[in-house]
Image (tube, rainbow, N blue to C red):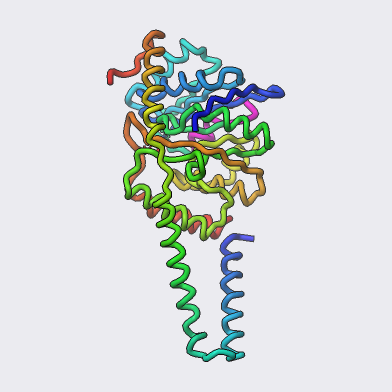
Amino acid sequence: MAVAEEVKSKGGNKYSLIVPTYNERLNIALLVYLVFKHLRDVDFEIIIVDDGSPDGTQDVVQQVQRVYGEDRILLRARPKKLGLGTAYAHGLKHASGNFVVIMDADLSHHPKYLPSFIKKQQETGASIVTGTRYVRGGGVHGWNLMRKLTSRGANVLAHTLLWPGVSDLTGSFRLYRKSVLQDLIESCVSKGYVFQMEMIVRASRKGYHIEEVPITFVDRVFGSSKLGGSEIVEYLKGLTFLLVTT
Amino acid sequence: MKHIVKIITLLVTISALWTGLLQMSLVPRSHIWLLPIYFIVALGCYGLLMVGIGLMRFPTCPKEALLLQQDISEAKEFLKQSGIDVGSD
Ligand SMILES: Nc1nc2c(ncn2[C@@H]2O[C@H](COP(=O)(O)OP(=O)(O)OP(=O)(O)O)[C@@H](O)[C@H]2O)c(=O)[nH]1
Ligand SMILES: [Mg+2]
């Protein structure tokens, strides 16, 4: 499970990591440190899209910029909480790499897996590499029975109805070719939780080459979840929406 | 083709086969009338079974949580030396 691989940027590839944050003061600096630790020989930049977090996330980002440089850590803040989907689009506008990685700031997406995403892309030439928790070498830690049950139920339902061709639909740790992400963001309309599922289902329908790498997911240690209780209803609506539009 | 169309096509094909069976009446009709119910029950069982198997085999990774703790302390150590505020806890 441990990933000690080394990767090197090939052919002038550059990777833009888009990290949306909302109240991630405790996590963001740790994340940046771990990214630099695991991507030594790779050309990359980290674009942090902060939605005016009241906890001072941006102050920490500015401190981190002084250590790692403003050319490596880009703070592209927005004035108020405008949601995740538009946060990716906003980050993408500022991305200078030809590949984009989307990851959460809360350390549930561990930077140690970044080399395996990049390697997989280099080996297969895929347009999308998506992290999956539900294969050998993957896993989840810190979920109670209820959370596991909803996750499995949602997964079975989605697979029976949508035949998506990828095992982990709602995970959001992914690497995209920049042009592909641009295309997908333009064609996706969902908000919030369903957005990740819509992105990958549309990608699969459009015939993009998708590869998977196992990742482990440790539930957030610091800070609190921003997802509301009406998750399940939203999910079912999203599923129906995808059934009739893709 | 929209995905819902695929699913509807599949259902229509199945019902066509079913009406075909009804008309041929090779087997007693009462059995054939019950087929849709069997189908729905089978589908439900399949769903429950898959969720059950998924739950039983749910991949967990307690080791990863420990490794993450180590990574966090390592990162905090470095960040403190660089004068970055990483919170007190
Ligand atoms: N810019 C921006 N980032 C957000 C917003 N909502 C959430 N995020 C960030 O998006 C990432 C994922 O959000 P999470 O709250 O971790 O969502 P989750 O992983 O589904 O839920 P938990 O980990 O259980 O809390 C984190 O890095 C958040 O800081 C938002 O409205 N705007
Ligand atoms: Mg999270």
Counting the numbered discs, the total is: 0
Of residue A233 and residue A125, the one placed in the foreground of this image is A125
* Residue drawn at x 49%, y 33% as measured from the top left: A1
In the rendered image of this protein, does residue A193 appear above or below residue B47? above
* Residue drawn at x 63%, y 51% as measured from the top left: A205
Residue extending furthest right? A11
In the rendered image of this protein, does residue A115 appear above or below residue B78? below
Question: Is residue B6 at all visible to an observer of this figure?
Answer: yes
Question: Is residue A94 at all visible to an observer of this figure?
Answer: no
In the rendered image of this protein, does residue B41 appear above or below residue A146? below
**Magenta residues?**
A86-100
Left or right: where A204 falls relative to B79 = right
Estimate the x, y position of residue B37 in percent, counting from the top left: 45, 78
* Residue drawn at x 46%, y 70% as measured from the top left: B42
Estimate the x, y position of residue A34 in percent, counting from the top left: 47, 21
Estimate the x, y position of residue A78 in percent, counting from the top left: 44, 28
Of residue B55 and residue A181, the one placed in the foreground of this image is B55
